[in-house]
Image (spheres, helix red, strand yellow):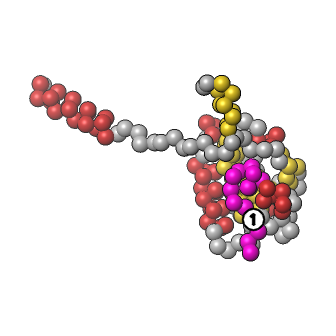
Amino acid sequence: MLLILLVLIPGALLLGKGSKSHYTNLPYIGQREVNAPGDTTYFTVPPFNFTDEEGQPFSDKDVEGKVLIVDFFFTRCTSICPRMSIQMQQLQLQLDHPQYDDVMFLSHTVDPEHDTPEVLKDYAKRLEADPSRWKFLTGHAPDNYRQGNMGYLLSANVDS
């Protein structure tokens, strides 16, 4: 019995030591304002107004208190967009549990002239997107690009 304890305890300690978390905190990007020691206001996504795949208005008020997973795409894209959309689809499926009810997916088109709500709705159906959690948004091109640049701190521009 003593031999078993002498083997099990050091083995358990070694396993525990090797299983430490290797996570690192992601940095905050964007503006921040220090209000007082320990009280900092970090960058937030500015207000926006777009149209979803149902032709309904969709704004920042619809995602208040949500964690956003956002991408920019266009439905006629044949390079990276299909891969990104499949990754969003897989992520939506993996996060399909009540503990992730605060996660919302937003896909902004960068080709609003072609990607009408009807086109976006068809694209969403092909991806089996859950319309309560994954919105496909369109609007005026300058507003889309401004949202990418100023709202999500991404490079979103017309391809030239």
Residue under the image location 77 percent in, 53 percent down: 147
- Quadrant for the N terminus in the image: top left
Numbered disc 1: secondary structure: loop
Q: With respect to residue 147, does 25 lie above or below?
A: above
Residue under the image location 21 percent in, 29 percent down: 9
Is residue 120 on the magenta stretch?
Answer: no
- Quadrant for the C terminus in the image: bottom right
Left or right side of 70 for 26: left
Magenta segment boundaries in residue numbering: 147-160
Is residue 151 on the magenta stretch?
Answer: yes
Residue type at numbered disc 1: Asn
Residue under the image location 68 percent in, 56 percent down: 154
Q: Picture coordinates of residue 114 (x, y %)?
A: 84, 70
Q: Picture coordinates of residue 57 (x, y %)?
A: 88, 49
Q: Quadrant of residue 125?
A: bottom right
Viewer-nearest residue: 150 or 108: 150
Q: Is residue 29 visible?
A: yes
Which residue in the protein does label 1 denote?
Answer: 157
Residue under the image location 73 percent in, 71 percent down: 159
Predominant SS of the magenta segment:
loop
Q: Picture coordinates of residue 153 (x, y %)?
A: 69, 52
